[in-house]
Amino acid sequence: MNSLDNVSVIKLDRWKVNILSNVLKKIKVTNTITMYNYLGIGLDAQITLDFHRTRKSPLYLFNSTLLNKMIYLGCGTQQFLEHQCQGLSNMIELYMDEKRIVLPDIESIVIVNIESWGAGVNLWELGVNDGNEFGAQFIDDGLLEVLGIRSSMHIAQLKMGIAEPIRIGQASMIRVKLLQKLPVQVDGEPWLQPKCEFVLKRCNQATVLKLSNII
């Protein structure tokens, strides 16, 4: 009960993710997802997808935090060797508030709504020293933050807090065109997505409880 003294009621932006695909030569919305936390395309989604596949395997017999961490590390190591998402900037097109963005050499793009990604990493805050004059991150300002990740080694360094992500920008509406099948995750749920277009727009706000230093 003492923890309730540190809880406050706040608003959290909710985002509608429309997936547009070519159906019988017509572009249609084929799926809609509500996003609260983040969307990842490329390397981070591939590692999460490999992890989920391993956990669903008949060979996965135990459920422990240590084992899960070891499996996740193994998935990251596999991607370090295989580089399946290398050249991601040539596989997608990014538009922020209808402006085409030229992407750097990255293997993953992450669009975040909250200050926590990858088991607690505050990506946006990690990049404050990158020299770009972006605004602070808020969960109720109608803006999403977009960041790039260079490699699986970069992910490991980010989790240890010894590297900075590539801060790409902030926007109230984001479109991402997938030019080929790519791994995607929304709020930790991964899948392989065929060629399509993602459109992210704020739909409304949710009322949530905030515990100090959690969101």
Image (cartoon, helix red, strand yellow):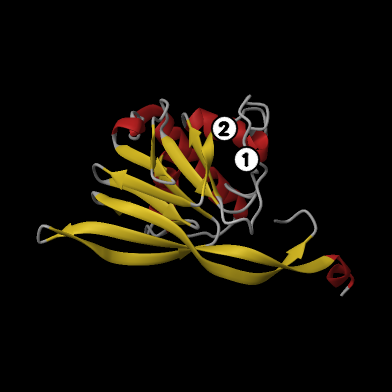
**Residue 39 placement (x, y as % from top left):** 46, 51
For the residue marked with disc 1, what is the amino acid? Trp
Q: Which mark is residue 165?
A: 2
- From what the image shows, is residue 208 above or below residue 82? below
Circle 1 residues within 10 Å: few <14, some 14–19, many ≥20: many
Q: Which residue is mark 1?
A: 124
Q: Is residue 46 left or right of residue 26?
A: right
Give the tally of numbered discs.
2
- From what the image shows, is residue 101 above or below residue 114? above
Residue 88 visible, this orientation: yes
Residue at the spot 85% in from the left edge and 68% down from the top edge: 3
Q: Which corner quadrant holds the N terminus?
A: bottom right
Q: Are marks 1 and 2 in contact (CB under 8 Å)?
A: yes
For the residue marked with disc 2, what is the amino acid? Pro
- From what the image shows, is residue 59 above or below residue 171? below
Residue at the spot 60% in from the left edge and 34% down from the top edge: 158
Indicate the secondary structure of the residue bearing disc 1: helix
**Residue 60 placement (x, y as % from top left):** 44, 57
Mark toward the start of the polypeptide (1 vs 2): 1
